[in-house]
Amino acid sequence: MSILEWSLQLVLLGLLGAAIPFALRLERALREIRRDRGALEGSAQGLGEAARMAEAAMVRLRASAELAGRQVAERTAVAEPLRDDLRYLIERAETLADRLEGLVRAGRPMAAEVPRAPEPALQSQAERDLVRALALGAARGGG
C-alpha cells in the first residue's frame, strides 16, 4: 500500500471516529422519538375516548333539555287558562272596589247627618269589645 492509500484510510478512519458521537446522539434522539410516539398514540386514543364520552354526554344533555322543554310547555299550557281567569277576576275586583269606594264616599256625608240612636244594652263582653273597636276605627278615619 502506498502512502496515499494509508493517508486516505487514516482520513476515513478519522471521519468515521468523528461520526460515531453524532451517530450515538442520533440513536438516542430516535429512541426518544419512538418512546414519545407511543405516548402520543396513547394520548390520541385517550383523546378519542374522551371525545366519544363527550358526544354521549351531549346526546344525554340534549335529551334532558328536550324533556325539560316539553315539561315547561305543558305546565305553561296548563297555567295560561289560570292566568286568564286571574286577570278576569282582578279586573272585576278593581271595578267592584271602585264602585265600593264611590259608595263609601257618597255615604260619608249622609252618615254624619244621621243622628245616632242610643246604644242598646250589650249583653256580653264580646259585644262591648266589638262596639269599642268599631268606634275606634271610625274615629281613626273609617278606613
Image (cartoon, helix red, strand yellow):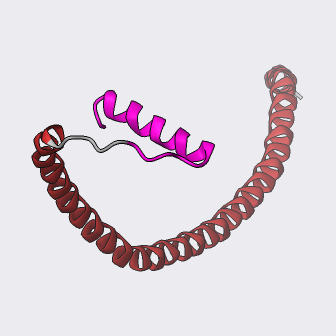
x, y percentage for residue 38? 83, 52
Residue drawn at the location 68% of the way across and 67% of the way down = 52
- Taking the magenta stretch, the answer to whether it contains residue 142 is yes
x, y percentage for residue 96? 21, 61
Query: How many dots with numbers?
Result: 0
Q: Is residue 99 above or below residue 60?
A: above
Q: Chief secondary structure of the magenta span?
A: helix
Q: Decide if residue 94 is on the left or right side of residue 86.
A: left
x, y percentage for residue 128? 53, 40
- Taking the magenta stretch, the answer to whether it contains residue 79 is no
Residue drawn at the location 87% of the way across and 27% of the way down = 20
Q: Nearer the viewer, residue 13 or 51?
A: 51
Q: Decide if residue 59 is on the left or right side of residue 81.
A: right
Q: Quadrant of the N terminus?
A: top right
The span picked out in magenta is 119-143
Residue drawn at the location 15% of the way across and 58% of the way down = 99
Q: Is residue 65 above or below residue 77?
A: above
